[in-house]
Image (spheres, grey):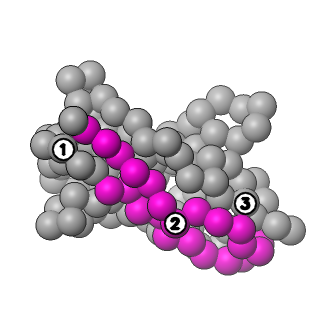
Amino acid sequence: QVHLVESGGGLVQTGGSLRLSCLVSGTIFGLDTMGWYRQAPGKQRELVASITVGGITNIADSVKGRFTISRENAKNTIYLQMVDLKPEDTAKYYCRSGLTSSKYDYWGQGTQVTVSS
């Protein structure tokens, strides 16, 4: 059975940093592109960063230069390093597997990030 478990969210001040982690259990890690999404109240869920099996990353323009996605295969984990956080980054952040194949499409429960001004 596949589970994605996010951690690392919290409350930070503007300009602060957080690192989110997504631990993947099951046998799908390393089989498809993974990504981090976020959803703010009243807004649609949006993709903020993705990373392919080969380590190629894509970062949304809204967070480029501030967010970095990485993966640690030995730990079945992907990360989202966030620096210079802004109040508009406040959202629930979700990890997702299988961005290019529905066969591996799973979501985590999300972790809340709140940035105070």
Q: In the drawing, does residue 39 fall left or right of residue 7?
A: right
For residue 47, above or below residue 7: above
**What SS does tag 3 mark?**
strand
Q: Which residue is mark 1?
A: 26
Which residue lies at the image location 60% right of the left edge and 75% below the top edge? Answer: 17
Q: Which mark is residue 48?
A: none
- Circles 1 and 3: CB atoms closer than 8 Å: no
Q: Which residue is mark 2?
A: 8
Instruction: Return the x and y of residue 51 as percentages of the image width and height.
Output: 31, 50
Instruction: Return the x and y of residue 49 as percentages of the image width and height.
Output: 44, 50
Q: Which residue is mark 3?
A: 114
Kind of residue sitting beneath label 1 = Gly
Kind of residue sitting beneath label 3 = Thr
**What SS does tag 2 mark?**
loop
Viewer-proximal residue, 1 or 81? Answer: 1
Q: Which residues are magenta?
A: 2-23
Figure quadrant of the N terminus: top left
Q: Earlier in the sequence, mark 1 or mark 3?
A: 1
Q: In the drawing, does residue 82 fall left or right of residue 112?
A: left
